[in-house]
Amino acid sequence: MSIQVNNISKEFKIFKREAGLKGAVKSFFNRKYEIFHALKSISLDINEGEIIGILGENGAGKTTLIKAMVGLLHPTSGSIFIDGFSPWERKNNFLKTVSIVMGQKNQLWWDIPASESFLLNQKIYQIPEKQFKSTLDEMLDLLDVRDKVNVQVRRLSLGERMKMEIISALLHRPKIVFLDEPTIGLDVTSQSRIREFITKHNEQYGTTFLLTSHYMNDIQALCKRVFIIHKGEGLYDGDFETLVKKINPKRRLQFEFSSNLKSLNVEKLINKPNVSINDQCLTAELPDNEMMDFLNQLFELDTPASFSFEELPVEETMKSFFANPEKFISKL
Amino acid sequence: MRVAFSKYFMVMRMTWIQALEYKANTIVGIFAVISGVLIEYILWDRIYETRGVEIINGFSLNQLIVYIFFGIMVGQLKSSWVTSFEMIECIRSGGLNKYLIRPVSFFSYHFSLFIGYNSLFYFSYFAMIILFQLIFPGWAFQTPIQAVAFIIFLSMAVYLSYSIYFLMICCAFWFGEVRTLILAFNLSNRIFTGSIIPLEFFQESILNIIFLTPLPYLVNIPVNIALGNISSLEWPQLFINGLIWVVVMTFLGQILYKIGIRKYEGFGG
């Protein structure tokens, strides 16, 4: 089951008017429209069993791309094939092999327990009884919501509801799952539980996952490959770790001196940018090629009480990237 | 076919479960019929008394009230404006996504919802009709075949009404907000389908125009069949005419939906 996105573009006609009553009256007689290019010649190939992250700022075109791939939107030009199916033809055999979870839209019936919505999906997707029971049992345990399955959906917490949404979307064991912000607004425990679940599901069934998320921890934990969209254009398609290294090749060093700092000549070290000292501990953020020299200098000065390296938080790295993507484009 | 039926039956089953959570809604529905008939009784009683006549447009006061009793019930059973509002909102705000991504039809799913939500009305109105038959034997359903014909024409009215609403709902793909269209239709619908007064009360020229539309098949014809005002000899022709409207409306609805869905923008994340 492969996904081929060939040069798709999507344009929206957007109605614009001036603010206020005067603007409303004027626009009633003379409406002004603008063409908004949500996607510009996007191409993407995804292999079976991959977990790929679609990244981009708000309004970049991530959700539009997913909607086009799942057949909710007709692209203005280009083509998409999912295992030979054109999504917007919405053939039943295609719909049975894909699923989508949107963090801000729900499929479950609000006033009745999720178990009833699961039964409805069993009928809609014609899931055999045995498979339905075993899949449901397994997912309820993995997501730790067995005791909530017979509680009215509106009485569930946001995290529990999202877990139920995910179960509902995966009951028919789709081969491709689109997850649009699945952890939005969830606490760290629920986020982590959902990530573990996606990983296990992917390993067990070879399901392909396409994921959008503003939480870089989700992306880091789940996606080896990412596709970055910026203002409707594809900016990067490749390994996530490599991308992070390209954006910010630095690592953080924590070096704890064993001797009293007053007796050491650390002045020339702390004058460097990205180096600071707090009590007995020095912190430096440097690229790998400068790190060894710097570390040698530290060892010449003093024997460390302890020292460690750590990667810089991905969240911060990507934040700096999205603040000015053009700056990094040449590096990519 | 069996598979399709089972999934849409499941949708109906869900509405029953949900409806049982909101029992008051059904009680209000029954009260609406009784209070509607009472109000009309008081109004028409005064009209008959003031005019000093026993028959108006071929209806005695009792016949008129029985017509209104059935008219309000049939009108209520085929009215799908609540479902229509939900469907319009789906198109406006992106809620349609959840139907498009599953192997279900938006039209059939919501038709099942509509039938499901109205089911309690069907049962309670059925009980009211039985009660009516026991208290006033011979005022309606003079022969058992009339009851069968009434059920057939009522089913057609329910489906035809939903198909007409669906046509208007599809306009939301182009205009976004079309709830006013539904409200306007609802208003004219109550008058021109014969829900609050028999169509026989209209002038000949207006009546001729009304009979060129599907509106009489929604209330007037099923009610007149129940009350024995239409000879059984006319039923086959009326049935064929009604069926033609059903086919036309369904076809137009599907065409409009297929064109409209290409304009759908699936708003919201």
Image (spheres, rainbow, N blue to C red):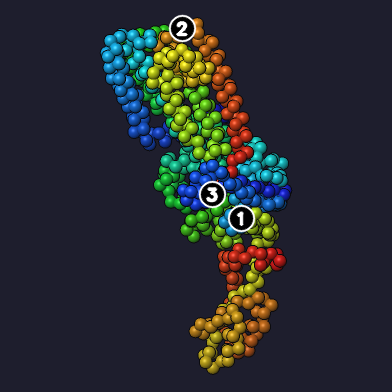
- Judging by the rendered image, the residue that carries numbered circle 2 is B231
The answer to whether A245 is drawn above or below residue B183 in the figure is: below
The answer to whether B56 is drawn above or below residue B37 in the figure is: above
Name the disc covering residue A60, or none: 1
Residue type, mark 1 in image: Ala
Relative to A161, is B140 on the left or the right?
A: left
Residue type, mark 3 in image: Arg
Relative to B126, is A46 on the left or the right?
A: right
Which residue shows up at 42% across the image and 24% down it? Answer: B190
Assign a secondary structure to mark 3: loop
**What is the spatial separation of the Cα atoms under label 1 and label 3, in whole angstroms?**
23 Å
Percent from the top left, x then y, of residue A53? 62, 56
Assign a secondary structure to mark 2: loop
Same subunit, tags 2 and 3: no
Relative to A124, is B57 on the left or the right?
A: left
Percent from the top left, x then y, of residue B231? 46, 7
Residue type, mark 2 in image: Ser
Assign a secondary structure to mark 1: loop
Which chain is mark 3 on? Answer: A
Visible residue check, residue B12: no
Percent from the top left, x then y, of residue A84? 72, 41
Which chain is mark 2 on? Answer: B
Visible residue check, residue A8: yes
Which residue shows up at 32% across the image and 27% down it? Answer: B31
Q: Are there few (<14), some (14-19), or many (20+) residues within 10 Å of tag 1? A: some
Q: Which of marks 1 and 3 is nearer the N terminus?
A: 3
Instruction: Check whether the beta carbons of the residues at disc 2 and disc 3 lie within 8 A of each other.
Output: no
- Judging by the rendered image, the residue that carries numbered circle 3 is A17
